[in-house]
Image (cartoon, helix red, strand yellow):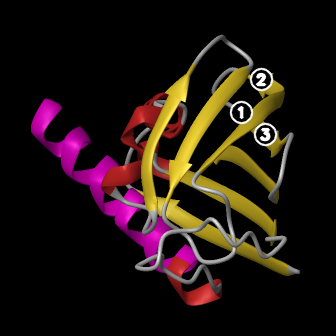
Amino acid sequence: MLQVDERLEIDAPRHEVFRMWTDFERFPSFMTGVESVFAETKERLRWRVSIEGVEPSFYALITERVPDRRIAWVSVDLATMGWWGDLTDLDDGRTCMMVRVVWAPRGDDRAPADAKPLDERTIRCGLLRFRTLVQEAFEKAA
């Protein structure tokens, strides 16, 4: 099992960070191995991934959503996955984002041959790309 805890300081207001973090269809633009995420309902997400040891498609349920403050989701099938994101205000319209990722793939044989490994470095790099994405979008809008 892998657990990653990351603290990001993002140069954008909390509501903008939350809005972009909960735009799940955007995840492939910053997370390695994520091909698509589709919100089937307000609580159910369908993920398509190319990650070692994981079936190419699985579902996750949003277990907690506090607008502009917190969101959490966990997988409901072959991969054990959980993501938690907490947002707090910093000074001057900046945001502190605390993210916890828990990942325990079950070694699915159906993962594509070219699937990417998911490790601590890959997750942290994806979160840094997310921070850059948010900051660039906020700067353009300002």
Q: Are marks 1 and 2 in contact (CB under 8 Å)?
A: yes
Which residue is depicted at the point 69% across and 72% down?
109
Residue 19 location, x and y as percent? 48, 28
Instruction: Name which residue type carries label 2.
Output: Val
Q: Nearer the viewer, mark 3 or mark 1?
A: 3
Identify the mark at residue 90; answer none if there is no mark: none
Quarter occupied by residue 55:
bottom right
Which residue is depicted at the point 37% across and 40% down?
26
- What segment carries the magenta color? 123-142
Q: Residues within 10 Å of mark 3 (few under 14, many from 20)?
A: many
Residue found at the far left of this picture: 140
Instruction: Name which residue type carries label 1.
Output: Arg
Q: Are marks 3 and 1 in contact (CB under 8 Å)?
A: no
> Measured along the vertical axis of the image, is residue 114 above or below residue 137?
below
Residue 126 or residue 9, whichever sits in front: 126
* Dominant secondary structure (helix, strand or loop) of the stretch shown in magenta: helix
Of the image marks 3 and 2, the number of the one nearer the N terminus:
2
Residue 119 location, x and y as percent? 63, 85
Instruction: Name which residue type carries label 3.
Output: Trp
Task: Say which residue label 2 marks.
Answer: 66
Q: CA distance from mark 1 to mark 2?
A: 5 Å
Say if residue 17 shows up in the picture. Answer: yes
Count of labels shown?
3
Residue 5 location, x and y as percent? 76, 74
Identify the mark at residue 73; answer none if there is no mark: 3
Identify the mark at residue 69; answer none if there is no mark: 1
**Quarter of the figure with the C terminus:** top left
Q: CA distance from mark 3 to mark 1?
A: 14 Å
- Say what secondary structure mark 2 lies in: strand
> Measured along the vertical axis of the image, is residue 63 above or below residue 119?
above
